[in-house]
Amino acid sequence: MKLVSMLTPVVLALGGVSVAAVPVSAAPPPDSAYQVTYLDAPSGFDSTFAVSIGEAGVVVGGAVATSTRDRAAVRWGDATAPEVLLVEGSHRGGVALDANARGVAVGTADGGAVGVVWDESGAGALLPRLEAGPSTPAGVSDAGVVVANGFLQSWRKQPFLVTHDGIERLPLPHSAHGQAVEAEVSDIADDDTVVGWAEIEHDDHDDAAPAAQTFHAEPVLQASLWRHGEATTLESPGGIESDSIANAVNPSGASIGGMAVVDGVECPVLWDSGKPRVLPLPEGRFSGWVTAVNDTGLAVGSIVETVAARNVESAALWRGSELVRLDDAVVLPEGHRMIAANDVNSRGQVAGVVATPEGERGVVLTPRPAPRLTQPLSDETRIVYGDPLAVRPVMSDHESAQVLWEAGDDLAGPWVALKEHTAAALEVTAAGAVALDGQWVRATFSNGAGQVTTNATRVRVDPAATAFRLDTESVSTKRGSPAVIEGVVSGRGLAGPTGLVTATHDGAVLAEGNLVDGRFTLRVVLDSSSASRDYDVDLHYAGDQHHQPAHAHQRITVDAAHTHPGNAKSTGTGEHLAATGADARMLIILVFGAGAAVMIGAVLRRRARTPGGEEVS
């Protein structure tokens, strides 16, 4: 399903030299996105070209005998043995331009002088003519409706349909910017939607100006659509004064492909729901057009580069907003180059032409299967905080497949591309892994021909283990004085652990403090009721977002405070010393009287010791 007039130079270029035998198909090399099938020529012919490919893989086109320049319409069933399509009467040669799912084909004979319809058996019947000139078929729907172009007595072009009920002329499209004087059709969908273009004569008239100042702009071609008996023009992205043509419509009738002149450049265009979208071209002096589009939105066509006043044509494919040079997607023999992509079916098979040193050959590109994973990703990929992330699904083939890595909060998306990662393995630094914690990471493997395999895993960054490292194994202090516990909480990661360290004894919190650069200092006061005692204090680190909790024990020895050696009644504490002095005063009062007690009591007070062991003078 393609533009007939753009095919003519390809057909005429075939011939002049013989073509060496080429195998029917070749196994694709590892880095080829497509399997390439060269179409064999019928007996007596040596060059071939592919024009259309059906949903079942049936290809139609033509063959040329370079020595005699004889031509024949050819049909290849599922791209296998060639079948010459015959023409009734004395009509010779020809080319097949389109075929439907049942194998009914349409084309021309006698160098385009007559239109032909071939049935499933290959027998041809001439297409009926209109008032003048030949009739040229443009396409055939699955229902067998043929769309064609003929001529009126005025030699104006007139599109028409051939149905089981006869001939139905199509109306000229309506344009809000002028009058359509003639039209030409190029393709038909399975729902009988027809596309093409109309020649519009624009009347530019200023109502306030004299009639003598009315002028007529040059006629323009405007892409057009016929649906349910009505004809309309399509919006041109280059404006109403710029040419646009519709070359193809997909089987469902929803998407239309063609060309529009934008800022003086012929650009490939897709119309979806009537809205045009200009497809990308390479940087430089390029032009291009779409010749076919399938129901998945895949478009094929040509791009032309102007080099030193010479046009160099290459086959192109557009997948969304991505442009693929088909020469880059296939590996061909030395000296072979793909110059045209004329059609594409819903399976993504492309029919086109390859230039070889010996001549031009028809080919079919069949997408390789999607990459197969022998070891897919698990549902979760877990690493420890501080470790880098490496995600590596294992493929059984397509080791050179293109890989797009993306990240998202949910499997349903939206997804954000990790553009720097294009290899089969995703490798991320420890810092990058933390940023992906809890997110889904998805790998989309593409064979370059639109066949993809998607695999996803959720990244989990587990907290790193931590441990106490105490400055000393045990700490000694005196009763009532604080015991100072110091140490470090260590753990793996980009930064040291943060958070709270707590000291407890018998369930009671004695002290707590925050880590500073991993270190902590706690001042613990223990009340001892005996002369000396050892305590085991529990240390607990609560952990943080990236570090696990930790536990340790610190031994603290509390020593009793010593009294003056002459005091036999000393128990080692100031309070007990005070009590002993009081008892002595009472005894002195009883034996010697109050006067002696005052003097001796003063001496005892001067020799009493503080709880820290110092004498009070």
Image: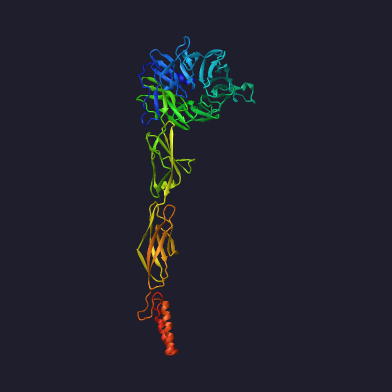
Above-or-below relation of 440 to 593: above
Q: Can residue 19 be spotted in the picture?
A: yes
Q: How many circles with numbers are drawn on the protein?
A: 0
Q: Can residue 305 be spotted in the picture?
A: no
- In the picture, the quarter occupied by the C terminus is bottom left
Give the residue at the far front of this rendering: 506
Asked where in the image residue 595 lies, by quadrant, the reply is: bottom left
Above-or-below relation of 198 to 449: above
Q: Nearer the viewer, residue 532 or 440?
A: 532
Q: Residue at x 44, y 52 (%)?
A: 545
Give the residue at the far top of this rendering: 90
Side of 155 relative to 444 (left or right): right
* Colour scheme in use: rainbow
Q: Return the x and y of residue 541 as percentages of the image width and height.
A: 42, 58
Q: Return the x and y of residue 176 as percentages of the image width and height.
A: 60, 25
Above-or-below relation of 26 to 417: above
Q: Nearer the viewer, residue 212 or 476?
A: 476
Q: Return the x and y of residue 63 as percentages of the image width and height.
A: 42, 17
Q: Return the x and y of residue 544 as percentages of the image width and height.
A: 44, 54
Q: Nearer the viewer, residue 533 or 233?
A: 533
